[in-house]
Structures are given as C-alpha cells and as structure tokens.
Amino acid sequence: AADEDMRPPVALLAHAVDEPGRSAFWPLAEFSPEWVAVRWALEHDVPARFIDLPAAHTLAWRAADGHGDVDADGRGDDQAPPGRSGTAPADVRRDPLAALAAAAGHDDPERWWEDVIEHRGRGAGDALAPFTALEEAMTALRETEEDREGGDGDVRDLVREAHMRLQVRAARREFAEGVAVVCGAWHVPALRRRATVAADRALLKGLPRTKVDMTWVPWTHRRLSRAGGYGAGIESPGWYGHLFAAVDRPVERWLTKVAGLLRAEDRIVSPAHVIEATRLAETLAVIRGRPLPGLTEATDAVRAVMCDGSDVPLALVHDRLVVGDVLGEVPAGAPAVPLQRDLTRAQRRLRLRPEAPERELELDLRKETDAGRSRLLHRLRLLGVGWGEAVASRSTGTFREAWRLRWEPELSVRVAEAGVWGTTVLSAATARAQADAVTARGLAEVTALAERCLLAELPDALAPVMRILADRAALDTDVGHLAQALPALVRSLRYGDVRGTDTGALAEVAEGLAERVFVGLPAACAALDADAAEEMRRHVDAVHTAVGLLGDAPAPGRGDVHSRWRAVLHTLSARDTVPGVVRGRAVRLLLDDGELAPDEAARLMVLVLSPATPPADAAAWIEGFVGGGSGGGMLLLHDERLLALVDAWLTGVPADAFTHVLPLLRRTFSAYEPGVRRGLGELVRRGPEARGSVTTAGSGVPGFAAGLDPVRADAVLPVVRLLLGRHPAPDGGDLAGANT
C-alpha cells in the first residue's frame, strides 16, 4: 500500500503453496475502510496491522471442511462491506444491515443506509454518534440471532473474533496511547465482550494450518459488483468511488461526468441538460423525503432529461460509470509466483497490457510482435488461463488471427495454479501439454492437442504428442474417430507453413490417417440408422475439406491423396448399402469438384427419385445433395433442371408418405438464406413452362449464359484488386490484366 505504483482496486491473494487453487481474495477499493485506514496510518507514521484470522488457518480450515476454494471469486463473509446490495439475504450474519433496513420498513438496505447514516451528517457535533447507534443495533441483532440458533452463533465467527481480541490486547500493551480498530459492524459487540485470554486461546487451539503464499493482484470495479467480492456485492462501485473522491457538490459533478460520457457517444447533451437534471434530482429527493439526492434520484434525472426516457443510453451509463471498468495496478516489486513474473515480462515485451474492458485484437502472424502475442495467448490457453478467446477474424488466410481479450482477477489464481508446471510460460505450457497427451481419452483429443502445440509453438511438446498420436491412431479402428482427428491435423499443417514449423512428422501421420479413412469409410457407412448416417455425413464433409488442404505430392505406390479420395466418393455415391444422405453428399462433392458431369448428376437424381425408391430414402438423398449448409439452394436456383426433378418428385409423393418426408425436407430447405428461399419459391410458382423467362437466353444449361461476357467481367476487377490489397488500375488501363 505504501508503494506509489499501487493503485486500487487491488486485492490480497492468498493461496496454499502445495495447492494453488485453494485460495482467497481480500479486495480493497479506494473507498474501502481498510484501505483508507492503512493509507492514513502510513501518511501519519502510525503502525497498522491486520487482526483477522491468518489465511494459513482459513485455507486449511476450509480444506478440512471439504471446500476446495475459499471464495476464489471474492472475500465472502470474511470482511464487512462498505456498501450494501439491494437484496437482503436470509442469513442475518451475512448482511445485518439488510435486517435493520427491513425492520425499519425499507426494502432497499442501500437507500436506508444512505438516509440514516451517509446523508445525515455528524449529528449534534458528535462524529461517533452514528457508530454508537450502529453498535447498539448490532448488539441487539447478535443477541437475537444467538437466541434463535440456541448457542453462541457461528463457530467460525467465534474463532475469528477470539483471534481479533488477542491481537487488540497485544496492541494495547504495546501502544498505551490508544488503539483504533477498523472492522465490520457485526464484530463490534464481540470485540467489546469481556472474555479471558485463556478462553480465547482455547478457541484457537488445534486449528489446522497450511503453508501460504500471499501477493497483491489487480482488481476491477466490475468484479466488486458481483456477489461474493464484498459480501452480497457492491452494485455501484463507480458511484462510491466518485462520492469518495468528490470534494464538493457530488451530484452536480456526477451528472457532469454522465453528460461527458453521453456526448462522447454522439448524443446531444448540453450544460442546460446538466442544470435541469440537477434540479430534478434535488426535487425528487424532497418529494421522496430523502435528506439528499442519491444514485436513484440521479439515475431517474438522467433518464428523464438526458436520455429522453430511454433505458438504452442509461444502460451505458450504468456499465461505464455506475459500475465502471477501472483496473487497479500492482507494483512490479510485489511478491509473485515465478510464472506470474515471467508472464508480466512477456506482457510488457509484447505491449499486451491486461485490461478490464473487453476488446478485440487482430493479429498478423507475419509480424514478429503479433506472432509473439499469438504464441503467448495460445500457451496461456493450454495452461487454463483464459485471458483471450479466439474468434473469427474479419480477414481470411492462416496468417490472420483474432482474439477477444478481457483480464479478470480470477486469472491470477489460474496463473498461480499453473505455476506447478513450470517457472516460465514456455516451460509450463510444454509440461502441461505433455501431461495432457498422456491422459487424453480419445484420438480427437490428442490431435486437437497437437494443433494447440503447433499454434503455441511448443517444439519440445510436439514431438512426444506426435508419438502418442501415432500410437493411438495405429490402435484405433473406429473410422469415425479417425475422421474426427484428420481435420485438426491438416489445419496444423497449414499453421505450420505460416509459422515456419517443421511439420514433416505431422504430415506423415496425417497422410497415414487419411489412407485409413479412405480404406475403412465405405464399409463403415453400411447399415446406419438416421442419426448415425447424419453424423457420418458430417465426417465426410470434414474429410473432404481436410483432403482439399493436403498437399498434392503423391505417396509412393498409391498415387496422390486427392485422386484416392475421389475414388472413395465414387464408391459411396454408387453403393446401395450407403445411406441416402451420404450418397447424396458424395454426388454433390464430386459435382462441385468437377469430377462429375451435370448430366451424370441429373441421371443419378432421376434414379434415386424414381417411384421404386422409398420416399424417406429419396428425401435423405436430397438432403445430402442440397442440404447441410452446402450451398444447395443456389445450385437449385441456377440449375432449373435439378429443381424440376425435385419438384416433380415432391408433387408425386403419395399422401400417406408425404407426412413422413415433410420434416426432413423442411429441415433441408429451411437452412437456405431467405433470398434463396424466395427465389426458389418464385420459380416453383411460375411453373415449368414460365421458368425459361428468368434464364439467360442462349444458355446451353438453364440459368447460365452461353459464354463469358468480358465487359461484365471487367467491371468487377477494380473491386477484386481492392480485396486483394492492390491499387486500382489507372484510368484507361488494361483492367483485363488485373487478374494476372
């Protein structure tokens, strides 16, 4: 607290040395009574000490009770909250002020506290009068609670308060001029209670104990607002921080801050709005019988005057100001586990500061700094430190990555937990990956781990992971498992190309895995029910995408991987024992790759839609051919010959079978884009005779022109050049050469 670089909100973090996940936080905001007392003591050269039960006992005690974490998201009931939440808990001990507010007829303990304490001033010149009255109320509450429980109350409270009394006695002996105690109001009657030293020591005898490390970690206002951090949570830490810092006229200053925020969001808010909102807040306080305007009155005034009665901009005010995204700072010299120190060095080197607000980060892996950021974020994910979440990039290509970042205080605990794997992020991630590979339950988990090792650039982990992967792949005979594993391996090969990683061993395993899929897939597709057939269709799609990304180099004695996969698709498309959804998808994939002529695809559709085929099987074939997000709607829209075949089959389905195929067809066509569905509906409505009017004249194939129109093609080339990152051709230039 004495360090100039220490800026609240911060928290004391205690964790068991042998089990870092067993931890506890003690958050402190700028307005926390404990923080204010410590800062005053430092400024006036007065000794200050903590008197609560040490964390060495608290953590061990909770572990003995079967609790792994001790309020890992906050302080629980260990400290008294400086503010109250809006909900009174059933447990009086957890929030006694809520019980007092309820007894006074108030349903909001926050407003009750402001009315009777915060807004009343010092009374008749006695600054301690509110505290005296509160002590009397707490004494009555504790007596009532103990009578109801039939004893002395919560054992944990009794032990903590015994330790507090011993510490206060020791301080009195050391400092004869007097001692001030800052504690939760609930504990005041217990500290006043007369108890012998022997009785207090007896309560503390035999307490469990564990070795504990402690450090400071940054905290956030948003984290203070959640239940757990401050008892039932402080709903408005930003508001309390403002009240603490405002030297005068707090409501006027608050409304000025709100106006500044709304103006920054392009809302029209003038000084006249601030004046009018201030008058309205003061008037509301008078009408409601409150001594001064509080947050409720200020919020109502902002809604009416600055937000035109809308709660949409008001939600922004609540998020940015009432709660806030303030993130505390901890000096570099604060004690920390070695892994945390290495992480801090990496964050500074890569200029990647932990921040409370959520933000998106676009990375270009061709740049060294961005590549380093990517490595760090992937390594932290391997360690279970979820600082960043990978999201879809706005750009295409494997050299682009996008992340959504938000630093939460709990991540400090995750870093402490990960410290058991190593002293640096690199060594810890390597050790964790090796251990995860050994304990992985399935082949897909190992392949996913290999991909993550490649993304995190962990060469020392990749080799043992690949050995385990090869062993698992050799023993696994389930084609579904092999098909699930292949895409991750192929993606890893692409990432390796971008990051300059040696992926020779990875390519060998991927090709071997692909060969086993090719051999086993036709047999695995036989005798499947509807759900298994749909799952196998997804496997076929995944393998097809993976094969398309594999290299073209032929394997010795086997030809290239693409030709072998095309042979598998031909087998699937022609084998009657293969479910219709898989056969239809195989035909569609061959058609899209130009390996099947449109006339042949139409012939296969005619056969499957013949009266000899059961309607349910025909519907499944159609779903495989034009469903499943394959762009089949556009295919039907532009190839009216296929649309006519589907239309003729559907109108000829017998009535008793139609109800059985309708759900499948509805699932197929409902996945199309609204514009595609509308276009198909228009074509069907016009009927076969009128459809030719919407096709291009002279087309050999319905829906397509007879040849390329150079003028229309040249018109889009400037846009294509922009998309490729090139400058448009100068006026009068040869645009036709832009695609070279």
Image (cartoon, helix red, strand yellow):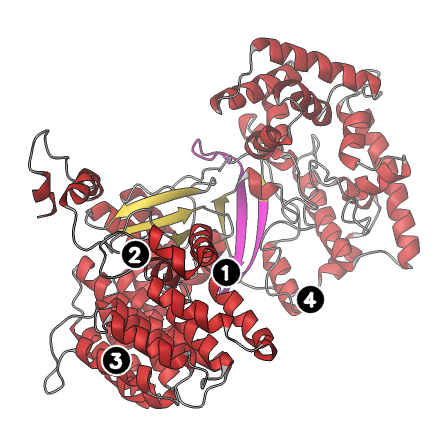
Tell me how many marks there are.
4
Label 3 or label 4, whichever comes before in sequence order:
4
Q: Residue at x 77, y 53 (%)?
A: 197
The residues colored magenta run: 1-26
Q: Amino acid at mark 4?
A: Gly
Q: Nearer the viewer, mark 2 or mark 3?
A: 2
- Residue 76 seen in render: yes
Q: Nearer the viewer, mark 3 or mark 4?
A: 3
What is the spatial separation of the Cα atoms under label 2 and label 3, in whole angstroms? Answer: 37 Å
Residue under pointer 2: 703
Most foreground residue, 28 or 681 = 681
Question: What label does residue 670 carry, if any?
Answer: 1
Q: Nearer the viewer, mark 4 or mark 2?
A: 2
**Residue 80, position in %: x, y?**
70, 42
202 relative to 423 in the view: left or right: right
What is the spatial separation of the Cα atoms under label 3 and label 1, in whole angstroms? Answer: 33 Å
**Residue 427, position in %: x, y?**
30, 63
Q: Amino acid at mark 2?
A: Gly
Q: Nearer the viewer, mark 1 or mark 2?
A: 2
Q: Nearer the viewer, mark 3 or mark 1?
A: 1
What is the spatial separation of the Cα atoms under label 1 and label 4, in whole angstroms? Answer: 68 Å
**Residue 198, position in %: x, y?**
78, 57
Q: Amino acid at mark 1?
A: Ser
Query: Helix or strand or loop: what does disc 1 sit on?
Result: helix
Label 1 or label 4, whichever comes before in sequence order:
4
Label 1 or label 2, whichever comes before in sequence order:
1
Residue under pointer 4: 206
The verdict on residue 486 being magenta is no
Q: Amino acid at mark 3?
A: Ala
Query: Helix or strand or loop: what does disc 3 sit on?
Result: helix
